[in-house]
Image (tube, rainbow, N blue to C red):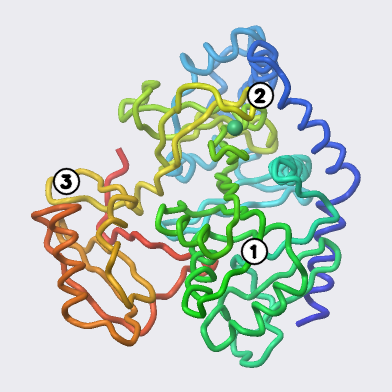
Amino acid sequence: MNIKNELFYGGRAMLRDNWLCQRQATQLRTHEFLNSKEMAALQNQYLHRSLQFAIKKLPFYQHISPKFTVADAPRVLREQFPIIDKSTLLLNRRTLYPRNGNVLLWQSVGKTSGTTGTPLAVFRSMQSVLLEQAFIKRHWAWAGFDEDATRVTLRGDVVVPLTQTAPPFWFWNRFNRQLLVSSRHLREQNIAPILQEIRRVRPHALQAYPSTAYVLAQLLQQRDELLHIPFLFSASEPLYQHQRDLILERMGCSVMDMYGMAERVAFATGCEHGNMHINPDYSYVEIVDEAGQPTDKEGYIVGTTFHNLAMPLIRYRLSDRTRWKQGTCPCGRNFPMIEPVTGKYEDSICGSNGAVVSPSVLTFAFKGVQHIKKSQVVQIAPAHWQIRLVPMVGFNKIEEQKLVSNIHQLVDAQVKVEVLLQDDIPTTEAGKFRWVVNLMRLPVA
Ligand SMILES: [Zn+2]
């Protein structure tokens, strides 16, 4: 396993962390100081280039005239390019993928997780793979994190065999000064050596899913211990308030959240002041309502790629929802702000009146309920939820009733709630934990 890890992480470091990527990251940092007019000009240039590529390469857009100026690109985008989504791509592979859907040898293929249906493949150019890393590095730089700093990674990486019962439960990636801890081994019986190793490497940052960082904070709480890590880089799942609170209490991290997706049509990064900034040099982002019209209220995120010209995704609608946040941020960057992204629409549940219930609101019901190790809220039928719990010693009927009555008092008075006690709640294949799951097929509007 160790030789395999050495080869994998060494090879990846060579590909991703070379001088070219470093130069790109430095170049990207200069964009943070552009004024809004300069930023718009840069966006128009990128947008114009993506639209021209799409018209030229993808039959789906061949009816659109390429004769428009750089300044006109946003208008042409809105007026002539329809909003598409995952199902449009799956149905139109011959016209929305380059070369009838045949990938070239030097291109990489990114896949969506498929946790909510058919996985989707996206072709990526070599250049866009490198640039992605440069954008991530720019975000890290906001936290003063550079090549010489040490990080602990607690994500889905399988770095030791799952059956292993003795330490080490981690792999030291010397190429990137990265301690990869196996999140599958993050349990009570293994935590002592894991904490010892984390303290030994003195990390500047923890890179984790919100749920894995939360598990670490819970284990610290059980042991009545603190672990100081200056920054948390969280990504890939919504970060709920109750998670943020406990992580802060136990590790004192400044949370630097990041929002991205396999389709790579939008990228938002949390700054030192806790605001989420859309990176306007990464892609062209719109927020639209059910009818596809721009809105200042909550709506779907729609993105147009700037850098992956191997397969330009134009006005691609995600199932994630957010809204624009008004005002300016004290960090001074001219990057538009958004409110926290609420999870996948497929992963949201509805109340008794059919309206989507915010997971953050759901967390209120769990406040003050003790002895719960893990929980998951699942919609199994209209107005019918199942709360799956992994109880700890001390959990009893009174706690259970308190949870149910909290839901009826704080979240939804009419919804039918059943509680199911389980030994464990499995994560997805990628090691992600879905706190809210909808087992009903929701129509995506
Ligand atoms: Zn800011």
Q: Amino acid at mark 3?
A: Gly
Q: Name the residue rendered at 37%, 22% in the picture.
A: 295
Instruction: Report the residue marked by disc 3.
Output: 354
What kind of residue is marked 2? Lys
- Residue at mark 1: 228
* Residue at left offset 77%, top offset 32%: 29
Q: Is residue 267 visible?
A: no
- Considering only order in the chain, which callout, 1 or 3, is on the residue closer to the N terminus? 1
Residue 396 quadrant: bottom left
- Residue 24 position (above or below residue 326): below
With 76 as the anchor, is 233 left or right in this view?
right
Residue 135 x, y percent position in the rendering = 71, 40
Q: Which residue position holds label 2?
A: 56
Q: Is residue 129 above or below residue 368?
A: above
Label 3: few (<14), some or many (≥20) within 10 Å? few
Q: Position of residue 87 (x, y in %)?
A: 42, 43
Q: Going from the N terminus, do you reach mark 2 or mark 1 first?
A: 2
Say the numbered circle drawn on residue 5. Answer: none
Tell which of 164 and 85 is nearer to you.
Answer: 164
